[in-house]
Image (cartoon, coloured by chain):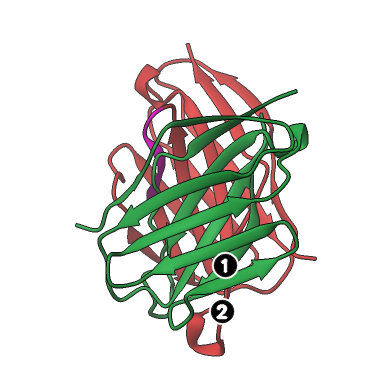
């Protein structure tokens, strides 16, 4: 079974802090994704990565950056946390679709509160 | 841009059938997925359908695809209280990364 592990289930930080959210997958997937989930808005893609050191902006990248130094690990960074970044953050991974059906597999999420 | 629409809420009685509907705009989706999210948890892959199929059955779940109308349905037979969750329709955009487009999700409440 694919395992996507997010380092924290709950996190509380202060405005202006630099925040790191970590995600690790154990299936050697090329693709990794960061989403945020807010009530009534569904999931919105922040950033994704299709290879080590490669990244692309998603729909709402402002205020975030990412790092992918190793294939299994994808980090989301809030450079200077603000209260409007309080949300549920979800990480996912997948293989390229060139090999057929390759769904995204999700971690359990990190509920981040910025005070 | 691509868009997915789902109703926000559905309430059914235990033992009844549930039908969760989804409409989408991107016509190039090859695989279309349904995910389930239980309270406080991440998303769990429930089922999927390939775009050249009209229907797929998997135990209590039936997925119906009307590609012409870009309409996807998830039918749950004999709905149980354990089926209470948020259900997301997620068409895949294809390509190497197969980005998914998510709707708001439908909260299914099963009354005993």
The image position of residue B61, as x and y in percent, is 66, 58
Residue A48 falls in image quadrant: bottom left
The image position of residue B17, as x and y in percent, is 63, 44
- Does the image show residue B49? yes
Secondary structure beneath dot 2 equals loop
Looking at the image, the residue that sits furthest to the bottom is: A99
Tag 1 near tag 2, CB within 8 Å? yes
Split into 4 quadrants, where in the image is the C terminus of chain B? top right
Q: Which residue is mark 1?
A: B48
The residue under the point 39% across, 29% down is A40
Q: Which chain is green?
A: B
- Describe residue A100's horizontal placement relative to residue B82 as left or right: left
Looking at the image, the residue that sits furthest to the right is: A1
- Mark 1–mark 2 distance (CA, rounded to whole Å): 9 Å
Residue A5 lies, with reference to residue B50, above or below; the image says above
The residue under the point 39% across, 35% down is A79
Q: Which residue is mark 2?
A: A101
Residue A41 falls in image quadrant: top left
The residue under the point 31% across, 64% down is B70
Residue nearer the viewer, B81 or B103: B81
Q: Which chain is red?
A: A
């Amino acid at each position: 079974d694919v395992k996507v592990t997010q380092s924290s289930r709950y996190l509380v930080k202060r405005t202006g802090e630099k925040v790191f959210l970590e995600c690790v997958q154990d299936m050697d997937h090329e693709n990794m994704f960061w989403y945020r989930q807010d009530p009534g808005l569904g999931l919105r893609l922040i950033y994704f990565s299709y290879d080590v050191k490669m990244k692309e902006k998603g729909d709402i990248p402002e205020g975030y950056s990412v790092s992918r130094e190793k294939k299994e690990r994808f980090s989301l960074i809030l450079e200077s946390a603000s209260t409007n970044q309080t949300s549920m953050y979800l990480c996912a991974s997948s293989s390229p679709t060139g090999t057929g059906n390759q769904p995204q597999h999700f971690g359990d999420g990190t509920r981040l509160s910025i005070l | 841009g691509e868009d997915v629409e789902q109703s926000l809420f559905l309430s059914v009685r235990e033992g009844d059938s549930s039908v969760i509907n989804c409409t989408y705009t991107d016509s190039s989706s090859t695989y279309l997925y349904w995910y389930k999210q239980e309270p406080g948890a991440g998303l769990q892959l429930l089922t999927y359908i390939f775009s050249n199929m009209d229907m797929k059955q998997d135990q209590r779940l039936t997925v119906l695809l009307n590609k012409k109308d870009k309409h996807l349905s998830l039918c749950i037979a004999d709905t149980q209280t354990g089926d209470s969750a948020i259900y997301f329709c997620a068409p895949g955009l294809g390509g190497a990364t197969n980005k998914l487009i998510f709707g708001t999700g439908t909260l299914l409440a099963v009354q005993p």
